[in-house]
Image (cartoon, rainbow, N blue to C red):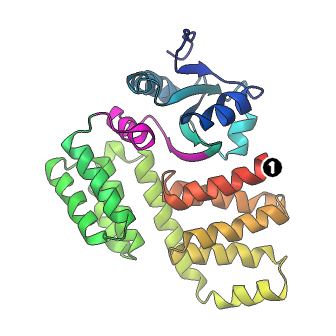
Amino acid sequence: MLNDAPQAGDPIKDVTTASFRQDVIAESMQQPVLVDFWAPWCGPCKQLAPVLEKVVQAAAGAVKLVKMNIDEHPSIAGQLGIQSIPAVIAFDKGQPVDGFMGAVPEAQIKDFIGRLAGPAGPSPIEEALSEADAMRGVGDTAGAAQLYAAVLTEEPENITAIAALAKLQLDLGAIDKAREVLALAPAEKANDPALVGVRAALDLAEKAAELGDLGEFQRRIEADPADHQARFDLALGLNGLNKRDEAVDQLIEIERRDRAWNEGAARKQLLTFFEAWGLMDKASIRGRRRLSTLVFA
């Protein structure tokens, strides 16, 4: 499927660095455009491609899919901070708005596209997960936790529910409970991207706890706005307090002032945040937009 030539009217096509602005940025002004970053040597890319294309075809033109071979066209992936493939980023109105990484199941792709272009017959489990996500989005953590737990009663090894419930506990500061939920995942799925992200978030929370009082970093920045190390440490601490947007802003400010500082440490930490929070987290989406604004300015 990766090498199939597009047909007339086909919502799936290849894209190059030269055609990216037209095929993605400009086209996304009309409807959402998914960019599938892949490479010929990538096994998971070959697993994802036919499933992704199937769901896009079923969407009947509500979204378009473009495929970018990062071996031949590496610059856009690098500018967007794509560190592993397959990675799918959705553009709407000229901006990256959503995304996922890895060879995810068909149901998750349907849910992803459903959020962009309308649902395509979700199952009761998918509906429960979507409802739980919505509850979490409006701050109803108790209701969301109950729904995630109900899903796990029906499907004890549902990775989406395990990762979401663990992350919910982590956001509440219950690190031990988050680890208990992660332990529910079967060993053979330990490297699932969703679980990897939660584990990364746990590591970040532990680092933040070691920083102590953040006031010292704030005072240093007030005295010297170019104290990038203070901004960097403040970003870590803010993330530990679940102040994600503020953490992003500090790292973006370092990137704006000096992209090369500490071998690009601010950009690397942003990417670590995005992995830990998940590509579809609101702060990740906002952070990628701000990062892309710097890149495409």
Circle 1 packing at 10 Å, graded few (<14), some (14-19), many (20+), is: few
- From the viewer's perspective, is 88 left or right of 223? left
Which of 172/58 is in front? 58
Given the current orientation, which residue lies at the most extreme left position? 154
Relative to 69, residue 136 above or below: below
Disc 1 marks a residue whose amino acid type is Ala
Given the current orientation, which residue lies at the most extreme front position? 30
Read off the residue under disc 1. 297
Q: Quadrant of residue 5?
A: top right
Is residue 116 magenta-colored?
yes
Q: Quadrant of residue 146?
A: bottom left
Is residue 100 magenta-colored?
yes
- Can residue 25 be spotted in the picture? yes
- Can residue 82 be spotted in the picture? no
Q: Which residues are magenta?
A: 96-120
- From the viewer's perspective, is 63 left or right of 246? left
Residue drawn at x 59%, y 25% as measured from the top left: 67
Question: Where is residue 134 drawn, in percent x and y?
Answer: 34, 58
Question: Where is residue 278 drawn, in percent x and y?
Answer: 49, 54
